[in-house]
Image (cartoon, rainbow, N blue to C red):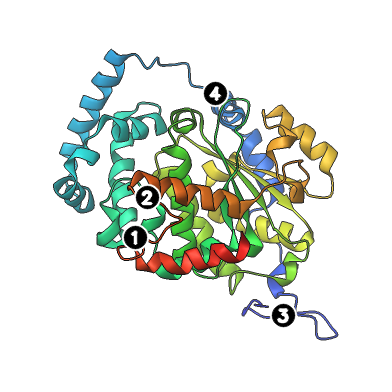
């Protein structure tokens, strides 16, 4: 059990951290006031993001898309500081200049080519930071992009793609905080991997790029107050700040809509103490639920087009989610694309570092 080094309080040897009894800088009331103060146009846009309503201010005709892709290329060319992007372009020009990739960034910024260009440059900077030059410049992000030290976290099941989409066709992923690893870089890489699985899926990727991605967050354990994955609140806040930045400013997704289920006062307080660090755009799209109030929670989710059968049972839905089966199927598909059968030994010479992950999976399946 990791406790907060900022200090503990309470009698009888209580481990409770001091920050739990302090008023956060930005509260849930502050968030409501922030939402109420929004101009009507922006308030409507926040609601559109929450329900995954497609932006009707443009139509993706071939002529419009081609015009915007060319405009994006011109804006990127005019940006001076773009070392990571230029390296990616030199190593893998076919992928970097592909219409598919550039279109994903245009969709993320509602076809504003200036903002999309900035996002694309930041994307390559962050990708190099997280995955290193050996993996960053390969197409997309796959299980092979992760580092060997990440595979224990992959096997635990802290992040996984849910099998169903919402009413608007948006992809969803499930985050179980108690199963996270206390390594920020590892968790950032897992978030990037999970996002890429959804955003470039052949069936739901385009719709998710246009309408946004849904995050369902739970503790994964009702006693989460004694299973803190990070060493301090400050470390968790730092992680949240950077990961929210990646979703809002680097990854090619229009928006992320978080639905967070809190099992107890400890987790609720931790979320509230982290609101400020999430950034305005991320927190305005977020909904927080008391996990013990399943009927009202499912009704609220239904108003956003998210049915109970798409939500795992441990946060009140009816989905019997098998993370390790999803992971096995995902790896099997990725290996199949490379011409390997994950169930035989043909890949082990080329990807020996994946042996540990295969061993982990054998324990669960």
Of callouts 4 and 3, which one flags the residue occurring earlier in the amino acid sequence?
3
Outermost residue, bottom direction?
A: 13
| Nearer the observer, 226 or 147 | 147
For the C terminus, the quadrant is: bottom right
**Which badge, 3 or 2, comes first in the chain's sequence?**
3
Occupied quadrant, residue 109: top left
Discs 4, 2 touching: Cβ within 8 Å: no
The crowding category of the residue bearing disc 1, from other C-alpha atoms within 10 Å (few below 14, some 14 to 19, many at least 20), is: many
Label 1 close to label 3 by CB (< 8 Å): no
Q: CA distance from mark 1 to mark 3?
A: 36 Å
Numbered mark located on residue 92 in the image: none
Q: Nearer the viewer, residue 9 or 101?
A: 101
Q: Nearer the viewer, residue 352 or 38?
A: 352
Report the quarter where the N terminus lies.
bottom right
User: In the image, 92: left or right of 21?
Assistant: left
The numbered mark, 2 or 1, whose residue comes first in the sequence reads 1
Question: At 27% across and 50% down in the image, what residue appears?
Answer: 138
Q: Are marks 2 and 1 in contact (CB under 8 Å)?
A: yes
Q: Is residue 159 above or below residue 167?
A: below
The residue that mark 2 highlights is 141
Q: Which mark is residue 131?
A: 1
User: What residue appears at the point 40 percent right and 27 percent down from the top-left corner?
Assistant: 110
Q: Which residue is mark 4?
A: 41
Which mark is drawn over residue 8? 3
Q: Secondary structure at mark 1?
A: helix
**Separation of marks 4 and 3 at Cα, in angstroms:** 45 Å
């Amino acid at each position: 059990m990791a406790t907060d080094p900022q200090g503990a309080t309470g009698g009888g040897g209580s481990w409770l951290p001091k920050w739990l009894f302090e008023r956060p800088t930005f509260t849930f009331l502050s968030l409501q006031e922030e939402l109420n103060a929004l101009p009507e146009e922006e308030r409507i846009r926040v609601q559109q993001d929450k329900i995954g309503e497609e932006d009707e201010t443009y139509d993706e005709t071939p002529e419009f898309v081609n015009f915007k892709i060319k405009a994006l290329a011109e804006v990127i060319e005019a940006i001076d500081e773009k070392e990571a992007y230029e390296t990616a372009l030199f190593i893998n020009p076919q992928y970097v200049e592909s219409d598919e990739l550039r279109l994903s960034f245009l969709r993320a910024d509602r076809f504003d080519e200036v903002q999309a260009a900035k996002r694309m440059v930041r994307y390559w900077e962050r990708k190099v930071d997280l995955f290193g030059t050996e993996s960053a410049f390969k197409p997309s992000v796959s299980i092979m992009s992760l580092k060997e030290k990440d595979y224990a976290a992959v096997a635990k099941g802290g992040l996984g793609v849910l099998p169903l989409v919402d009413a608007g066709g948006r992809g969803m992923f499930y985050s179980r905080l108690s199963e996270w690893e206390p390594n920020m870089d590892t968790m950032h890489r897992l978030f990037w991997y999970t996002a890429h699985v959804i955003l470039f899926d052949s069936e739901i990727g385009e719709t998710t790029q246009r309408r946004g991605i849904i995050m369902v967050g739970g503790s994964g354990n009702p006693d989460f107050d004694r299973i803190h994955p990070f060493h301090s609140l400050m470390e968790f806040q730092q992680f949240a700040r950077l990961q929210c930045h990646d979703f809002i400013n680097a990854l090619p997704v229009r928006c992320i809509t978080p639905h967070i289920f809190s099992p107890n006062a400890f987790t609720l307080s931790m979320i509230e103490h982290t609101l400020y660090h999430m950034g305005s755009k991320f927190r305005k799209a977020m909904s927080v639920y008391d996990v013990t109030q399943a009927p009202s929670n499912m009704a609220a989710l239904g108003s956003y087009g998210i049915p109970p059968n798409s939500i795992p049972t441990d946060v009140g839905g009816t989905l019997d989610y098998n993370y390790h089966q999803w992971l096995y199927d995902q790896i099997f598909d990725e290996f199949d694309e490379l011409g390997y059968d994950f169930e035989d030994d043909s890949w082990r010479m080329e990807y020996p570092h994946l042996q540990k992950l295969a061993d982990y999976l054998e324990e669960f399946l």
